[in-house]
Image (cartoon, grey):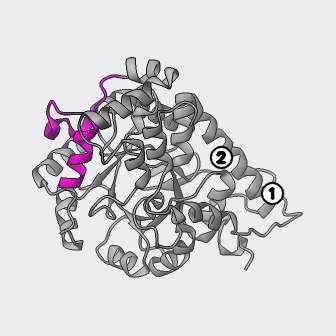
Amino acid sequence: RRRLPRFLFDYIDGGSYAEVRLRRNVSDLENVELRQRVLTAVDEVDLSTSLFGQTLAMPVALGPIGLGGLTARRGERQAVRAAEAAGVPFCLSTVSACPLEEVTAAASKPFWFQLYMIRDRAFMRDLLARARAANCSALVFTVDMPLPGSRYRDFHSGLAGAPGWRGALRRTLQGMGKPGWAWDVGLHGRPHSIGNLAPVLGGKSGIDDYMGWMKRNFDATSSWKDLDFIRAEWGGPLIIKAILDAEDAREAAKLGEHGLIVSNHGGRQLDGVPSTCRALPPIADAVGDQLTVLADGGIRSGLDVVRMLALGAKGVLLGRAWIYALAARGGTGVSHVLSLIDAEMRVAMTLCGAATIGNIGRDNLVR
């Protein structure tokens, strides 16, 4: 908060409507109680696991965050390097500041790519071709954005709702009030654009252009049958993001997808839905081992990771946990957060009597 202009901080920190779900993602997960077991002879803890053909140092990935690269100088480049150093995946958002090709040049290993259903199918086809050319190892397809949520903080801050010179002036003044950010990102972090949208935005690459494009191009007419188009163009592991209902999970399993992410978009879409930790167990029960179940939402520590695994997830995606760190200290901050999560998981697993990730399950929960 001290480092970022208000419009960027409120964008990454805020949620939709009254932000009830944003808060309950955290509080409901905090209230999940684990069984402490003693004298279990757990001398060494192994955090490694495998997801979608990739061996990970721990069951954690950096989830996709729009505009994330504007919180630090070429932020997605710094984040992907931190993820690689920690041995975990990084997922690049469609609406990242750095384009696919720039992140590929900064990375030494394949990363994941996130995509929305967009009205312009030709643009989607081109974007998927770029992701394949970048050797992205998995596609995270977000399905809860037929239109943007009602995020009132973005209207109050000047990010949305004040187009033209008024909104730009408010954001400029906010940036000038944060000299560290203005020097690091405002001056030395150019170009200030949504890199993957450059082919459709052309020379218009400001935030107003991005917000307008989002409102015009998310496709509320899409249905499960439209996933045929994605599969045909992609061909690799496909992970459906933002499943909250067991029936939708069964539909994804029936269609033969590789994985799903139990997610309410960090509380940024529909405020009245369940928190992710409450939605997770029935979804995990509904699909069993038919596909890989991941989860995000409210995860702030290694203890939270263990809680989600005990509730049925095979892995988790971090959101605010890593973007706060990137905004505060760049890639060094992201590396620090990942090292904390590693250490916290080891303590939690030892005291739960779980030597490996495969040992964590419902038996670790206080019923």
| Depicted 56 relative to depicted 222: above or below | above
User: Residue 2, image x and y in percent?
Assistant: 58, 32
Residue appearing at x 42%, y 43% in the figure: 157
Q: Which residue is mark 2?
A: 341
Residue appearing at x 50%, y 33% in the figure: 4
| Depicted 196 relative to depicted 189: above or below | below
User: Residue 141, image x and y in percent?
Assistant: 32, 58
Q: Quadrant of residue 76?
A: top left
Q: Is residue 231 left or right of residue 288?
A: left
Residue appearing at x 37%, y 40% in the figure: 67
Q: Nearer the viewer, mark 2 or mark 1?
A: 2
Q: What are the residue bounds of the magenta stretch? A: 190-216
Name of the residue lying farthest toward the front:
166
Return the residue nearer the eye: 271 or 45.
271
| Depicted 51 relative to depicted 106: above or below | below
User: Is residue 232 among the parts visible in the rendering?
Assistant: yes
Residue 210 inside the magenta-drawn segment? yes
Q: How far is disc 2 from disc 1 in space, using C-alphas?
A: 19 Å
Mark 2: give few (<14), some (14-19) or many (20+) Cα within 10 Å.
some
Q: Earlier in the sequence, mark 2 or mark 1?
A: 1
Residue 353, numbered label: none
Which amino acid is tagged 2? Ile
Which amino acid is tagged 1? Val
Q: Quadrant of residue 39?
A: bottom right
Q: Which residue is mark 1?
A: 42
Q: Quadrant of residue 361?
A: bottom right
User: Is residue 64 among the parts visible in the rendering?
Assistant: no
User: Residue 177, image x and y in percent?
Assistant: 49, 25
Q: Main secondary structure of the magenta part?
A: helix
